């Protein structure tokens, strides 16, 4: 009898999520500009892909790499928020990632 | 005391610890990161105490989050500036927690030392040609930079060919070491970004 530990599956699932986080964040921002909590809500609508603690370092990295650009909205009476949107470079990267993702998914569908 | 003020205190306590963990960063970076995390936690607090607790839990310990930012900042900066020695120091400093990265850093260090030795051999051959060379015989091998050539039982093998050979080996070790160093640094950057996912 084979025993599959919950830890094994949780770790494997976490690895899948990690690989998908960047694509999910870029795809979320492709629809419209958004701030952190909006990105999390949209990215995790169908299940948790990105955690709060992973999102912000990822946004910082993407911004430094020129894939997204942020602007602070400090309108009076509301919580100051940093809104992000894709740059043309980010759009190009997203296009490439989508193509690769579709190819990968088709390959896995054929195998699994 | 109201729930709002409790939430505000909790948020400020988290941000204060995060800001302390971000001390190695320039002030403007530190402020930008702290403001964004404060903004996020305030948005979550607006949805209730449970949402704030989930957000803080999802962020992880402020020290860990701060360390992730600092490591990424240092590595990205060193990669951008292209200073191999600075990058090597940071990589060796960061990789003590990961065996593969640490071994990679040691291999890079070894390649740099081999490179330096090769350049030393090439340079010294021009200054002291009789004392620099390779001597090989059964039960005898010597590669000396400034050795007593007279003690060798066989003639030297390479002559002045040792100069171009050493230069080529030195350049190859230097370039190989630098490429490996960048690969290790990028790997650490990726892992740092994914550690909290």
Image: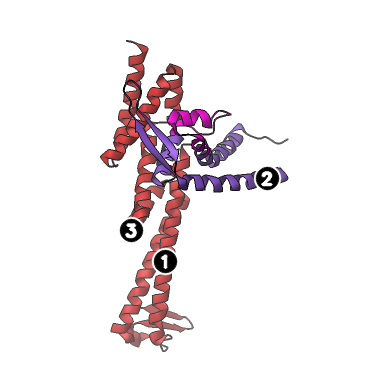
- Give the mark nearer the N terminus: 3 vs 1: 3
Q: Nearer the viewer, mark 1 or mark 2?
A: 2
Q: Which residues are magenta?
A: A27-53
Establish whether labels 2 and 3 are both on one chain.
no
Residue under label 3:
B83
- Is B129 left, or right, of B168 in this rendering? left
Q: Quadrant of residue B128?
A: bottom left
Tell whether label 2 touches label 1 (CB within 8 Å).
no
Q: Which residue is at the front of the view, A48 or A97?
A: A97
In the depicted structure, whether residue B81 falls above or below residue B14? below
Q: Secondary structure at mark 1?
A: helix
Q: Residues within 10 Å of mark 2 (few under 14, many from 20)?
A: few
Q: Secondary structure at mark 2?
A: helix
Residue under label 1:
B175
The numbered disc on residue A106 is 2
| Rendered location of residue B113, percent (x, y) | 37, 66
């Amino acid at each position: 009898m084979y025993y599959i530990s919950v830890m094994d599956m949780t770790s494997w699932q976490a690895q899948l999520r990690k690989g998908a986080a960047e694509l999910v964040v870029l795809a979320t921002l492709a629809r419209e500009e958004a701030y952190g909590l909006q990105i999390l809500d949209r990215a995790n609508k169908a299940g948790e892909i990105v955690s709060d603690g992973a999102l912000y370092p990822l946004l910082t990295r993407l911004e430094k790499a020129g894939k997204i650009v942020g602007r602070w909205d400090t309108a009076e009476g509301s919580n100051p928020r940093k809104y992000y949107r894709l740059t043309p470079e980010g759009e190009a990267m997203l296009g490439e990632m989508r193509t690769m993702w579709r190819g990968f998914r088709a390959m896995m569908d054929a195998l699994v | 005391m109201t729930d709002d003020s409790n939430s505000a205190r909790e948020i400020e306590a988290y941000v204060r610890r995060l800001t302390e963990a971000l001390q190695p960063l320039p002030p403007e970076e530190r402020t930008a990161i702290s403001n964004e995390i404060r903004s996020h936690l305030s948005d979550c607090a607006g949805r209730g105490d449970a949402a704030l607790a989930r957000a803080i839990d999802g962020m992880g310990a402020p020290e860990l989050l701060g360390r992730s930012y600092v490591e990424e900042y240092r590595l990205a900066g060193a990669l951008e500036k292209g200073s191999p020695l600075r990058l090597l120091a940071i990589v060796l400093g960061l990789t003590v927690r990961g065996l593969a990265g640490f071994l990679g850093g040691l291999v890079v260090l070894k390649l740099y030392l081999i490179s330096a030795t090769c350049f030393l051999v090439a340079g010294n051959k021009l200054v002291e040609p009789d004392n620099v060379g390779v001597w090989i015989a059964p039960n005898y091998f010597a590669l000396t930079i400034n050795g007593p050539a007279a003690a060798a039982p066989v003639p030297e093998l390479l002559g002045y060919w040792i100069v171009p050979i050493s230069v080529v080996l030195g350049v190859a070790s230097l370039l190989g070491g630098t490429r490996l160093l960048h690969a290790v640094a990028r790997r650490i950057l990726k892992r740092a970004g994914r550690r909290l996912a």
